[in-house]
Image: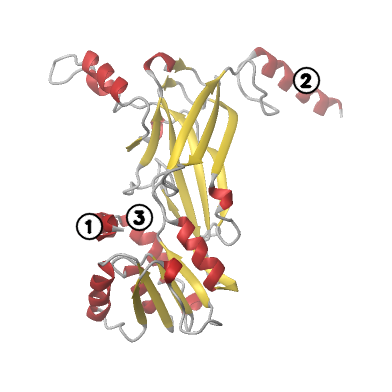
Amino acid sequence: FEAYEDLKVHELMLTDGPRQDAYHRAIVGNPELFAGKTVLDVGAGTGILSIFCAQAGARKVYAVEASSLARLAREVIKENNFQDVIEVSECRVEDFRLPSAEDRVDIIVSEWMGFFLLHEGMLDSVLVARDRFLKPNGLMFPDTATIYLAPCRVASRFDRWNNVSGVSMQYFGRALRHQGSDKPEVLTVAPDHLLHEGHVVTWLDLKEVTSEELDAFEAKEVLVAQRSGKLQGFCIWFDCTFPVGEQEGRMPNGIVLSTNPAAPETHWKQTVIPLPEGACEDIEQRDPIAFELKMMRNKETNRRYDLQLTLLDAEKEEHSLPCECQMTKCILMKAHLEKMQVDV
């Protein structure tokens, strides 16, 4: 847990506007959910989420932080005069105990997300806390999470080397890509560099999902390009949603923390799986892009995930019906289905 003691890491999170805003709106903006409730903050860090809960009217907040940052959190909590509401425990949540064995909390809050949601995250610890300490009708903040994938251009790895101060550095760019070709990269992807709006890899109900269900995910799909461009990689991002109260004027889709390229940038950015040089190709709108993605828990470090992406032959893969791609078989099938509807 030494990495969590680096204050620069917490500075990055505290200055992440979209992250802070989403949690603030979800907690402080929902006082009817927190008033008089008991809350468990898993991985409390600097204590800011615990303070949000106290500001929202929580009766008691248990802030659990495994690193020595717990001592700093106590001082921040005193600075904000919530030491009588928030109790900080310096331990792993797996070792934490509530004052009474029969006690359960009303709400669990945590900012557990890692890159592409799960990599180097701490969802497993949150699930331990949920199973041990959350009331049956309790709330999780956030309560759902979705991982998306889309084919994309990776301009920062390719186009930038065409002209560097008037000098062509394409050879250097190729060598650089070869050196890191097997490693996903955390990058900022422009929305117009996505060749598709995004395919759902998995959706997680955080009240129900088990640790075993997080071991591996697979997505095998044929996507239809929604814009033309150079296929140079695949972009992964995630969204998290939060429970909302019943106040008037609520957004129908609730509060969402999104790392979508079209959303304001967060410290998570996006994760890109770059394609080898020889696999990159020009894509036209309505071209089919077939792939298989596997996300697997690392066997040595279970908080890390390995990614494996395979390009498939769109001619040989089954397409969804009706398919909007421009392959002859799909055009004919779509026309046949439309004719059947007219005949009916």
Tell me the residue that label 3 is attached to.
18
Amino acid at pointer 2: His
The circle drawn on residue 6 is 1
Which of the 4 quarters of the picture holds residue 25?
Answer: bottom left
Residue at left offset 48%, top offset 31%? 308
Q: Position of residue 332 (x, y in %)?
A: 72, 16
The circle drawn on residue 336 is 2
Q: Secondary structure beneath disc 3?
A: helix
Q: How is the image coloured?
A: secondary structure
Q: Secondary structure beneath disc 2?
A: helix
Q: How far apart are the alpha carbons under marks 1 and 3?
A: 21 Å
Query: Relative to 11, does residue 311 appear above or below in the rendering?
Result: above
Q: Marks 1 and 3: which is nearer the front?
A: 1
| Number of residues whose C-alpha sits closer than 10 Å to that of mark 3, classed few (under 14), some (14–19) or many (20 or more) | some
Q: Position of residue 182 (x, y in %)?
A: 37, 27
Q: Position of residue 201 (x, y in %)?
A: 55, 40
Amino acid at pointer 3: Pro
> Looking at the figure, which quarter contains the N terminus?
bottom left
Q: Marks 1 and 2: which is nearer the front?
A: 1
Which of the 4 quarters of the picture holds residue 3?
Answer: bottom left
Sequence-first disc among 1 and 3:
1
Residue at left offset 39%, top offset 33%? 272
Name the residue at the front extreme: 300
| Number of residues whose C-alpha sits closer than 10 Å to that of mark 2, classed few (under 14), some (14–19) or many (20 or more) | few
Q: How far apart are the alpha carbons under marks 1 and 2?
A: 61 Å
Tell me whether the residue at label 2 lies in contact with that at label 3, contact meaning CB atoms closer than 8 angstroms.
no
| Number of residues whose C-alpha sits closer than 10 Å to that of mark 1, classed few (under 14), some (14–19) or many (20 or more) | few
Residue at left offset 41%, top offset 52%? 121
